[in-house]
Image: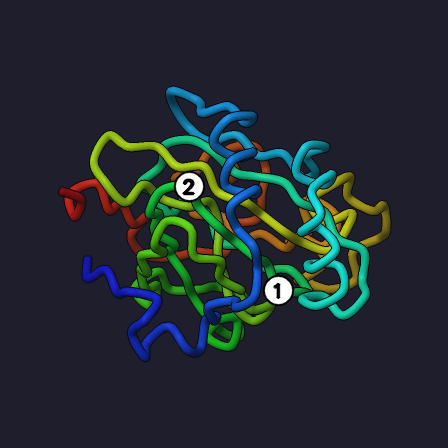
Amino acid sequence: MHIYSINDPEFAPYGRIVEGIAADELLEVLEEQTPLPEEGTKYLAEDEALMALDVEADFWDRIYGGMPVQLGWCNGHNTKLNCLEYHRDSEINLGTEDFILLLGQRCEIEKDGMFDTAKVKAFRVPAGVPVEIYATTLHYAPCSAKKGQGFKVLVVLPRGTNTEKPQFVAKCREDTLMTARNKWLLAHPDSKAAKNGAVIGLKGENIDIAGDLA
């Protein structure tokens, strides 16, 4: 699979590089105070040490226009697509190491609610560079950028995202995709999420970039 850079023009529909964020303290906390699972990934929606940093105010005021935010992380080892998700808001990511994002576009979800994984593009995000992933972008867990290497990635979202799912009666297909607050998930049939009851919304290959890593 071709792996683009976030500096390539192909990235423009999916997101942008965020300027003016002081990343040093964020990277230090991610590196020294968050765990790296030996297998798989682990996600924490809100991390107290990250939330205590002065830079949290920048995300609250400048990036999200005064909306309350949560600073958490997704760490681990991964090379597979498995699922794609979206939120009603952008997501900010920042890694201590290079990492790869597998991305799609919501506008390419077909009328039957399925998304063809052949439309997924891969993008390398350099260590220490914050990126905004637009609300219109389908995304999921980061992937390793180097064979055998893990990742530690900051995840900034509006407060409450990915916490307990609201309870309501589903009135359309999209309602059935919600697996947590402000989280709509399209699962691949081969994924653990699908086996646990998530709605199948991906067709085609369950992309694995392991063979594309050096």
Toward which corner of the image does residue 64 lie, by quadrant?
bottom right
Q: How many numbered tags mark residues here?
A: 2
Given the image, on which type of amino acid does mark 2 rest? Thr
Residue nearest the viewer, comparing 110 with 153: 153
| Viewport quadrant of the C terminus | top left
| One can see residue 176 in this view | no
Furthest toward the top, the residue is: 38
Disc 2 crowd, CA 10 A, few/some/many (<14, 14-19, 20+): many
CB within 8 Å, label 1 to label 2: no
Position in image of residue 31 (x %, y %): 47, 31
Residue that mark 2 sits on? 96
Residue nearest the viewer, comparing 75 with 167: 75
Position in image of residue 140 (x %, y %): 48, 50
Residue that mark 1 sits on? 90
Position in image of residue 201 (x %, y %): 50, 56
Toward which corner of the image does residue 197 lie, by quadrant?
top right
- Nearer to us: label 1 or label 2: 2
| Viewport quadrant of the N terminus | bottom left
| Colouring scheme, one of rainbow, by chain, secondary structure, one colour | rainbow
Residue 41 left/right relative to 55: left
Residue in the picture at 45% in, 71% down: 14
